[in-house]
Amino acid sequence: MAKYIMALDAGTTSNRCILFNAQGEMCSMAQKEFTQYFPQPGWVEQDAMEIWSSQLEVAQQAMANVGANASDIAAIGITNQRETTIVWDKATGHPIHPAIVWQCRRTSDYCDQLKEKGLTDSFRAKTGLVIDAYFSATKLRWLLEHVPGARQRAQRGELLFGTVETWLIWKLTGGAVHVTDYSNASRTMLFNIHTLQWDEEILAELDIPRCMLPEPKPSSCIYGHALPQFFGGPIPISGTAGDQQAALFGHACFAPGEAKNTYGTGCFLLMNTGETPVTSQHGLVTTIAWGLDGKVEYALEGSIFVAGAAIQWLRDELQFIGSAAESEYLAQKVPDTHGCYVVPAFTGLGAPHWDQYARGTIVGLTRGCNRCHIVRATLDSLCYQVNDVLTAMEADSGIQPAALKVDGGASANDYIMQTQADLSAIPVERPSCVESTAMGAAYLAGLAVGFWKNKEELARSRTGSQMFTPRLEETARIKRIKGWNKAVRCAYDWARED
Ligand code: ADP
């Protein structure tokens, strides 16, 4: 009997591998960072060969840590940084260019052209997304335009496109399998999330040859087998989802209205909306959560650019704290923020405000404000921003989540968790295993091979969460949110040329 599911977590800055046992416990972990390249301001690249080699290395290391061989691994699940775009030669397996990372802004101008052509509504209706350089479509077009001969070679069927999970599956299967899953496909801006097909009109608009795209598949099914040369025997690869969707699954947010937020450098809030794709009127995107059990489920997603990064700013630029964890202690040395608000709009504001000209601000300062008040107001700013997205989600979907499940580095901060519960009037649930992303990939892979029976069994196996219950009186809550809204208005539009 196989003992483990292997989860490959191909992140933006590092690759990890975690082995989970049948109880969902972490039994082994290995991690390796890889190089980031910044060839021009706003451009971000990675070496796809390094992504592959470091991912393979940590997988082998995680197995060696516990003396596992291939027969101990029931299946491999993959979760990945989304949208990052790789094009490679089908015959040699060599990428034709460095991977263009999701953060890369090189196609912003082209996105503006698409918007000026009036394509915003049709793209949104088909893909669920707003036209933005963030998604893969325009990155892929850029590669076809800028790498000499690429479009002709792609048309001749010599080149393949993939996001990171597609690339890893192709490599693990020795080039035999070229697939993606619906959750990752829904982040390319080339995929029709209603018909579950690559969209011919968008492909024509961007001049992308259909033959280079992977086959879209459910998120939990056997795609193929890793070659024996990698792990000493073949292992089925049977689950994949983009990192945020995998985290939603790892939190067992299986029912409509269940939501999770990841408090990392930025924040990613996703709410399951079931089999109905909800089109946002409030600046959120619609995404495929996963394809499972013969159906597809959708999520509303809102991203916040600066969250944990604001705590790094307190530490590195202001030097108000020695470590991120110290912020919790200082914030609680004072009973409130003394009327001040920090709006950390350092790179503009994301969902639901979408103001790329907004900039950071501190308002409401009086003579009595000290370091602790500003630290506290900065921690509060994470909660206010998350609350704005939650409010938008409720308005779009008509559903008020019963609880908010959390993970990510800043979710370790009890002050932030309690403040979130208070400001959003929602219980906040922090699981004991915060590796929800890898857990989600493991769950998807394990379900496909019968390692776990069904979602109900997974939901039951989750124990030991810590709950933060709302304690703030409603009038005080409304007053604080009103103050925040006023502060955000001060941040709007600051960097626009007059
Ligand atoms: P990412 O995956 O985006 O790199 P992580 O989930 O690793 O992010 O979280 C890192 C972020 O969490 C950092 O921005 C850091 O400032 C913040 N962070 C870590 N620990 C704490 C803490 N105890 N309190 C507040 N913020 C924290």
Image (cartoon, rainbow, N blue to C red):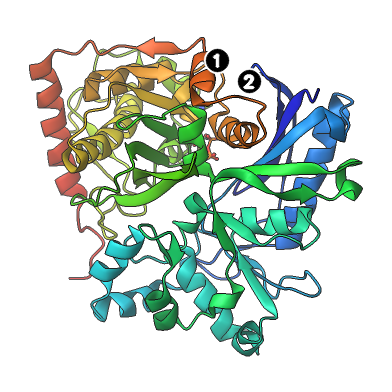
Q: Relative to 35, say whether 214 is above or below.
A: below
Viewer-closest of 37 and 407: 407
The residue located at (63%, 33%) in the rendering is 442
Q: Is mark 1 within 8 Å of ligand 1?
A: no
The residue located at (72%, 51%) in the rendering is 224
Label 2: which residue? 24
Contact check, label 1 and label 2, Cβ < 8 Å: yes
* Amino acid type for the residue under numbered disc 1: Ser
Q: Relative to 263, say whether 141 is above or below.
A: below
Figure quadrant of the N terminus: top right
Q: Secondary structure at mark 1?
A: helix
Image-based side of 96 in relation to 399, left or right? right
Q: Position of residue 22 (x, y in %)?
A: 68, 19
Q: Position of residue 441 (x, y in %)?
A: 60, 37
Q: Position of residue 408 (x, y in %)?
A: 50, 31
The residue located at (26%, 35%) in the rendering is 390
* Total numbered labels placed on residues in the image: 2
Q: Secondary structure at mark 2?
A: loop
Mark positioned earlier in the residue sequence (1 or 2): 2
Q: In this orientation, does residue 75 appear?
A: yes
Q: Relative to 52, say whether 258 is above or below.
A: above
Residue at mark 1 to residue at mark 2: CA–CA distance: 7 Å
Q: In this orientation, does residue 148 appear?
A: no
Image-based side of 37 in relation to 68, left or right? left
* Amino acid type for the residue under numbered disc 2: Gly
Label 1: which residue? 461
Image-based side of 483 in relation to 291, left or right? left
- Quadrant housing residue 94: bottom right
Mark 1 Cα shell of 10 Å, populated few (<14), some (14-19), many (≥20): few
